[in-house]
Image (cartoon, rainbow, N blue to C red):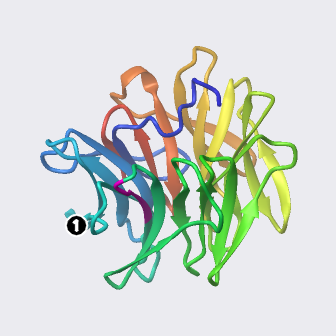
């Protein structure tokens, strides 16, 4: 893994309306939290993520019409909400059990369904990253060794040919999947469409990850620049654009999810762009 990228080392949320990077940034901070992370967004602007409370416990949340709803898996020592809500209101995320192992969950109609990729092992046994309008879920398992698609109750493993690591990070309504892979220590983003992988590399970047894709095919993600600083980017019609979050520390940011005309990132300073 490229140290400059650190895809999971995020402590704040950024929301953006305009996936090209133009727009107004607004901070997202769960009241009283010491850290807030944004992970998912739908076309209506409802946001999903997680926060760290003053007692240093991790909780999931959704944010709709400026109202936060906390999500905690019963019996878990930590809960994150990482994908959605989709149009049906479903969200996916992850929880840590008493053995400090991570598993995926689906929250639908107030009911939690826990899941693991069959035979998965490791500390991060199964990690759910996103859910689309059809209810298909993507993520990774075996400590990020392999990506997966969960569709119609059936799991399919996702592995970029020759890669030591494959992570599926997002899926759109057209069932196009994005993520990243590692070959020979170098991290690259990808789009998986119609069974074919397309590699995404931000020019001159130390490494690239891709986390979100909307129906028109605009993607968002992060890259490590020449100074080793993590930056957020969008890719639309073949054009890369760095998403600069005003006031962010050292410019560090990651594009995490994108809907029809809104994007959400996580970075070192909580900000919302609308």
Does the magenta-highlighted stretch encompass residue 35?
no
Assign a secondary structure to mark 1: strand
Percent x, y for residue 205?
Answer: 69, 26
Residue 95: in magenta span: yes
Can residue 87 be seen here? yes
Q: Quadrant of the N terminus?
A: top right
Whole-percent x, y for residue 149 in the image: 67, 68
Is 193 left or right of 149, judged from the image as shown? right
Q: Which residues are magenta?
A: 93-98
Left or right of 54 on screen, residue 205 = right
* Between 118 and 79, the one nearer to me in the picture: 118
Residue 186 placement, left or right of 264: right
Q: Position of residue 176 (x, y in %)?
A: 71, 65
Q: Quadrant of residue 98?
A: bottom left
Pick out the residue farthest to the top.
227
Residue occupying the point 37% across, 45% down: 14
Occupied quadrant, residue 2: top right
Q: Residues within 10 Å of mark 1 (few under 14, many from 20)?
A: few
Query: Of 118 and 257, which appears nearest the observer?
Result: 118
Report the residue at 18% width, 44% height from top. 33
Give the prevailing secondary structure in the magenta stretch. Answer: strand
Identify residue for label 1.
69
Vertical side of 165 occupied by 125: above or below: below
């Amino acid at each position: 893994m490229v140290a400059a990228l650190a895809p999971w080392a995020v402590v704040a949320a950024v929301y953006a309306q305009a996936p090209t990077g133009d727009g107004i940034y607004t901070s997202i901070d769960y009241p009283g939290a010491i850290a807030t992370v944004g992970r998912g967004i739908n076309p209506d602007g409802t946001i999903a993520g997680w926060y760290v409370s003053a007692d240093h416990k991790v909780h999931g949340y959704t944010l709709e019409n400026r109202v936060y709803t906390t999500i905690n898996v019963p019996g878990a020592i930590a809960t994150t909400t990482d994908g959605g809500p989709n149009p049906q209101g479903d969200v996916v995320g992850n929880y840590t059990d008493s053995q400090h192992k991570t598993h995926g969950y689906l929250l639908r109609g107030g009911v939690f369904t826990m899941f693991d990729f069959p035979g998965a092992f490791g500390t991060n046994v199964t990690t759910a990253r996103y859910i689309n309008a059809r209810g298909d879920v993507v993520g990774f398992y075996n400590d990020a060794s392999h990506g997966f698609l969960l569709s119609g109750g059936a799991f399919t493993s996702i592995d970029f040919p020759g890669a030591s690591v494959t992570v599926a990070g997002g899926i759109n309504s057209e069932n196009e999947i994005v993520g990243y892979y590692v070959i020979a220590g170098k991290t690259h983003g990808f789009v998986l469409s119609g069974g074919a992988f397309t590699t995404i590399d931000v020019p001159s970047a130390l490494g690239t990850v891709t986390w979100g894709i909307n129906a028109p095919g605009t993607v968002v993600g992060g890259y490590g620049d020449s100074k080793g600083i993590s930056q957020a980017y969008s890719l639309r019609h073949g054009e890369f654009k760095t998403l600069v979050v005003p006031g962010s520390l050292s410019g560090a940011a990651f594009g995490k999810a994108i809907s029809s005309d809104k994007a959400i990132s996580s970075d070192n300073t909580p900000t919302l762009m609308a």
